[in-house]
Structure formats: structure tokens, C-alpha cells
Image (cartoon, rainbow, N blue to C red):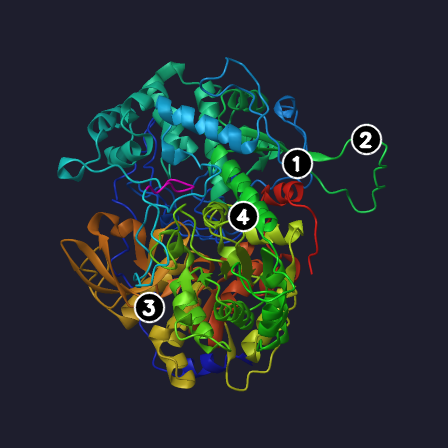
Amino acid sequence: MSTDRLAGEAASAPEEAEPHPAVPAEPDGTGTPAPGGPGGPATAGTEPDHTPDDHSEPGGAGAPAGADRSDAGTAAAGQGGADDTEAPTAGTGGPHGGSADREQPPAGEADGSATEAGAHSGSGDRERAAATPGDGAGEKGRRSAAAEALAAAVRAVESGERSAASFFNDAPARRPAAPTPTAPAGPVRERPRTAAPAPAPAPVRPPSARPAPGPGGEIPGSGDVRQVLTAGGAPESLAGPVAETLGERAAETLREDPWQLLAVPGVRPDQADGFARALLGPACEPGDERRALALTGWLLERAALEGHTALESSTLRDALAKVSVPDPDEALRTAIAEGAVLVFQDALDAPPGARPQAADDEEAEQPVRVLLGLDRYALAEESLADALARMASTFVPPQDGEATADGPGAPEWESAAAAAPTASAAELIRTVAAHGLVTHSGGEAARDEPAALVAAARALGLRAYAAAHSEDGRRRLAASLSGAPGADPEAASAAVTVAGLLADAEGPGRDEEGALALDLLAVLDAPQLDVETAAMLVESLPDGARLVLSGDPGVLWSAGPGRVFADLVAARRCPQVVSRTPDPGPIGELVSGIGIGELNQVEAPGKEVVIVPVRDAGEAVHRTVQLVADSVPRAIGIPAEQTQVITPGHGGAAGTRALNAALKTRLNPGPGQFGGFDPGDRVAYTPAPGRTVPGTVVSADAEGLRLDCAGGPVVVPRTEVGELVRHGWALTAHQAAGARWPAAVVVLPGDATAGLTRAWIYTAFSRGERHLSVVHGAEGALPRAVAEIPFKERTTRLRALLQAQVPAGPTG
């Protein structure tokens, strides 16, 4: 490993201008002044730059665990609070300021004094403590997850109490029809359809479409909302987001319950309290039941943005106390009675060294933890668990005889395994031949193994496809498929993106029942699947199909809630194939060591790995610009447009905004003629939460900003540019996950060390294919994070649900 070899070369170059030039800022909001007077909330902005970029604690404010706040699709005017990094430094709580931020759940605690009476024992079961609309008042009933969810959803939608988009629907017995197509992240490729899509699309999770704007582009109801906001001292620029979030009766809703303002993305509790004080006057009290309900939902939504699908009851009670709810226990009882939250009891593993429970000891109590969650994520996890159980149970393994109309027989599969390029690929083929649900783990080099599986399955006559997280991953997957032994000429067309597959823009299309018309699906980058996307995907597969979830267990988890891949592996309810194929070269050796908690020196004779020590954030920005613009192109031969900068956060002196400003000044100076962007600017486009698509600005016109994203044209409407597009010379690790570049420059400023984890470092360091430069100002925090902080835990229920529903079997 070379230390400052390139830095020495860079230092000999002519000194550059100030690394923090004054260039037009990226459009983060409307810039509406924040009314800070008594009784009035500060401007509730989207705070698009807060991104905790790792598995953060519950209760923290921010975007989907590590994703750009704009990834979450937020839209509010103004900028509230200071800039944040994805990994805030110690002692900072982020922009939301609420004292509930960064509350760590006590390990294994199952204190449930406020909720135990309403919790139903047994892993994965739940009981509503209040009747849903249409039930008898105060009635309690124990239902299955699917029956309860479907009944509640139908009644609430028909009565108008909730929108269909607010529910995550469990699938009925019939396979779901094709989801309503949405614009894919990249270009739409033509592919042959083996079956026509279902005529009546009915997605598992209905997309939440924005209300159609009225005359002049204003969302209906905004005028009335504006009057209420003015009366409450809130900026009028919030009228559109409020009307979009709360619907046609938004003004009436706010008058009746001012704390419903918290439902608007980016609004903080102190802002909602100020708004309520202005509207209610002396009647506004901290113990108001409306306030408690709104804060309970807000805290659970914040937790979801940090990756949690539920919170322990003790954690949520503590968080409510920290936002000045006088009686958190009573607040939780009210939230449960109103149906605002659901109650669960999950069985806990026995502590190490504990005496096993005797089989005849019926009075012994199994330790449990009481969890509280929102129905959206509860239904998503339960739907996913049901779908995974269905994949495992409906699959019929091949017979020992020859191939039949139902598919190839065992001899054909064994012949395909014998022809596999590696022993790990052969093991994967043999395992998938006999099972409907399989996990596969490995690094970058191991991606060739599921490609070999798909190629072999296609050669056997099966409709086999492979899906990647990003367009870059799809391109690399297509290359692997084309080069796989025995691949057919159309093998590359079997590579799709998850988003394109779900939108019916890529892949095989749908059968007459709405299921994807395929026999085998291998999903690469599986750790990037959030629980809702995973549920939609698995619910879309037909009975009897084979599903392989493949990924690198060392990388960051999904930007959205859940830890699907990790929970499936931990549940040990399906065969697990672990690749023995190592990643090559000095970068592969370095990253492999990080994956087991070791930060090793590696030999890099070709300057594959270079460490550039810096003293402070200003020097980090300066050295980063030198590396990208001069040293790496000159010494390594990789041009600036093929080098990606990765840093822990958006805010701060060495966050993405500061780095992008300096890199734009050096690489593509210009006035920022369209919302801070110029033709030739590298950008990060966020078409949906958790998905970042690198692109380049081509031009701008009346329709919007025109981008080139992976060779496909994209037009971003003018009104959405500030929300969906930011400069992209520098990204966060979560934004970069699923993609690779010829060179990567990882910036580790000293003010971001509190958020470093092994998973973050592993992900960032593994983005470079041929070269990695580390601009290192983290000192001892880097080896400490690698050795001692694997990841930041998430509270989820999928593992317990799978263990309850899927019989234990061979795990490999």
C-alpha cells in the first residue's frame, strides 16, 4: 500500500485556487426565510442533505438510512436547520433537534408496561387493541396477518378514512397483477415478451402518486392550506407539500389537529409545536392527545428512515419523553387504542449459557421483546415472510429421470454443474436445482456465479433472469452472462434491474395472473433490497419458481427500512451457498481483510491503493480535487470522468456539497444557468427513494433538465430538479452502493469519524475497480471502526417471522 505516493506528485503540481469557491449552490429549497418569532415554527424544509448513510439508531432524524433526503421523495420549501453529514460528529443531534435523536434500543429489553396488555404472545403474531372501522367499538380480535390487513385496508379505503397508497396490501390467493409502470432509472430496453401483462394491474403496494396540479401548477386545496399556515405563523411555501401529503381536506385537518403538520416530510416537532401554539393559543398543551399521537407516528417514521421496521416499546417510550410528552405510557396506550400503531411480541434467543427449557416445563416463560410499529412496514414484513415461505414450499425438486415438460431432470442439472467454470458456481447450480429458495454470499468476483447459474438454466430451457440494483450492476451482469460457459446469444438480455423488472419495463413481462413469466430469478445486490421492494418482488413470482438472493454480506444495508438479506441468512431457513472465490488484486485483498475486521497493509506495486494523509477538512477537499483532476489521470491513466469521490455525508466542510462545489469549479466551471447546473456537470439523479442514478447534464429547456443517464435520456421537470438532482462528482457510500468505477477516491474527514462503521468502509473502499485513493484524516477512528463497529443495528421482525413460518431445513 502506497502512502501519499500520489499525494507527493500532486503536491508538486501548481497550487490550485481556494477549494471552496463561490459557485451557485445546488437548489436545496426555495430559500424562504424561517419565521423564528415566538409561536411560529421555523421554516420546515426538506433538509435534503441529511443522510445518515449507515445503520443508525432509532429516533434519529434523517433520510432513508444513508440515502439522500431527496431520495425519500420529500418536498417542502425552505431550509430548516444546519447542514448535516450522514454520520454526524459526536455531540451533534442533526437538524431535527429533537432530543429523541440517536436513541439506542436497550439490547434484549422487553419492558412493556404500557403495551403488554395489548400484545399477543408468540413470534410474529399481533393484536389490535382497538377495533378497525366496521368492527364493534372496543372489540379486540385475533386475526391472521393477511386477513386483518386486507379487511382493514378495504374498510378504510371504502370509507375514505385512508388512501389506498397508505396501505401495503397483502396479496390475495391470486398472484398479483403487474404493478403500474413507473419511469425506470435508466433507458428502457426492448425485450421479447413471453406473455402479455395482466389487463388489470393491481400492485402489491400501490404507488403513492402525487395529486394532479390544477391551473397554474398549484395542487388543489393549497389556497385554503395557505390561509391556515399563515394563521399559524408557518411559511406559505409549505402549502403545496401539506396539500400533497394530507389530501383534499388538508386545511380542515390542520385546523382540527395542528400537529398533523408533522406528516409533511422535513417538519420537526418544535416547528409543529410552534404552529399549534399559534393556532390553539392557551389550549395548546404538551399532554394534548393529538400531539402524543402525532409524535408517536413521527418517531416511528423517523425510525423507518433509519432502517427500522419497528421499535422496542421501551425505546419508543424514552423517545416520547425526550420530546416532552408528559406521560409516554399513556400516549402509547392511546396510540394502540386508536390503531395508530401495532403491537408485536417477538421471541428472543436464550442468552449464552442459559439452561435449556425442559420439554415438559409448560410454566416456563420464553423471553420476548415487545415491539411497536406502523402497519405499512408490519404488513410489508409479513407479506415478504409469507411470500418467501411460499417460494420454499411450492417448489417441486426435479426427479431423477430425464427432462419432462415441467423442466430439466436431475441428470441435466448435474451435467450443467459439471460444466460450471468454478467449484463455487457448480455448488450454486446443484443447490438451486434442488431448492426453490437459496441465498448466495460472496464478493465482487463471486457475481460470476449467479451469472453462470442463469446461463446454465437458460441452456436447459428455463426462463431464467438475473436482476441487479443499479444500471451499472446490470451492465456488468450482462457482460458476465455473455461470457458464461454455454451462454446463448441472447443471454445478455436476461440481465435486468430490480426497478425495471417491477415496472414491467425490463424482463419477461407478466403471465395471465399477473406473476412474472419466469422460472428462475437470481437477485444480485440483495443487501440493497428494502423490505417493501423485496415484498413486491417476491410476491410477483409464480408458485414453483426458483429464487436466489445473492449479495456481499459486508456492504451497507438498504437505504430503506429492513435488512432483508441479513435476516434471511440469520433465520437459517433455506440453503446458503458461500462463495470461495476471492476478489483479486490489492484492492480485493484490502477489502477482504476489512470484511473480517482487519485493516491490513497490502502490497500495491501499481499504485492500486494509495493513502493520502490530511490534517483537516479544508486540506481534504484540496487534495481530493488534485487527485481527481491531475494525479490519478497522470499517474494511473484513469480520466477524471471515470473517478468517483465518496465521502460520509452531504454537509460539513468535506461533505458532498463542498467537494462537488470545488470539483465543479475545477472540472466544469460555469454559472449554474439552470438551478445551479450547467451542461457537462456530473449529477446524481434520484428517481425513487433509495435509488441513485449517475448522469451528466446535457441541456435545459422549458420542459426541464435533460440528463444522459447510462446512455439513456432523462428529462427532470423544472419543479423537481431541486428535489431529485444534485451534483455527482462526490457521492455518499449508500448512493454509490451497487455501482463501481475504474477509480474511487474515498474522503475520510476528521469531523465524520463518529459515523464510521466496518460496513461503510467496506462499501466505500470496494467501489474502485483499478485504483483506490484514501484521503485520510480520521486517524485512529478508521482502524477502530473496522475492528470494533461492524454496523449499526436495525430493529426488524423478518427473521422471527421466517423462523415461525418456514420449517428448518438444510442450510449448507
Q: Earlier in the sequence, mark 1 or mark 2?
A: 1
> Which quadrant of the structure image shows residue 199?
top left
Q: Earlier in the sequence, mark 1 or mark 3?
A: 1
Q: CA distance from mark 1 to mark 3?
A: 52 Å
**Location of the N terminus (image quadrant):** bottom right
> Which quadrant of the structure image shows residue 759?
bottom right
Where residue 7 appears, as percent x and y from the top left, is 46, 79
Where residue 250 appears, as percent x and y from the top left, is 29, 26
Q: Residues within 10 Å of mark 1 (few under 14, many from 20)?
A: many
Q: Is residue 180 left or right of residue 387?
A: left
> Tag 4: residue type?
Ser
Q: Residue beneath label 2, please?
A: 364
Residue nearer the viewer, 426 or 674:
426
- The nearer-to-camera label among 3 and 2 is 2
Q: CA distance from mark 3 to mark 2?
A: 64 Å
Residue 663 shows which numbered tag?
3
Residue 56 shows which numbered tag?
4
Q: Residues within 10 Å of mark 2 (few under 14, many from 20)?
A: few
Q: Which region of the structure is painted magenta?
A: 200-206
Q: Earlier in the sequence, mark 3 or mark 4?
A: 4
| Disc 3 + disc 4, Cβ < 8 Å | no
- The nearer-to-camera label among 1 and 3 is 1
- The nearer-to-camera label among 4 and 2 is 2
Q: CA distance from mark 1 to mark 4?
A: 25 Å
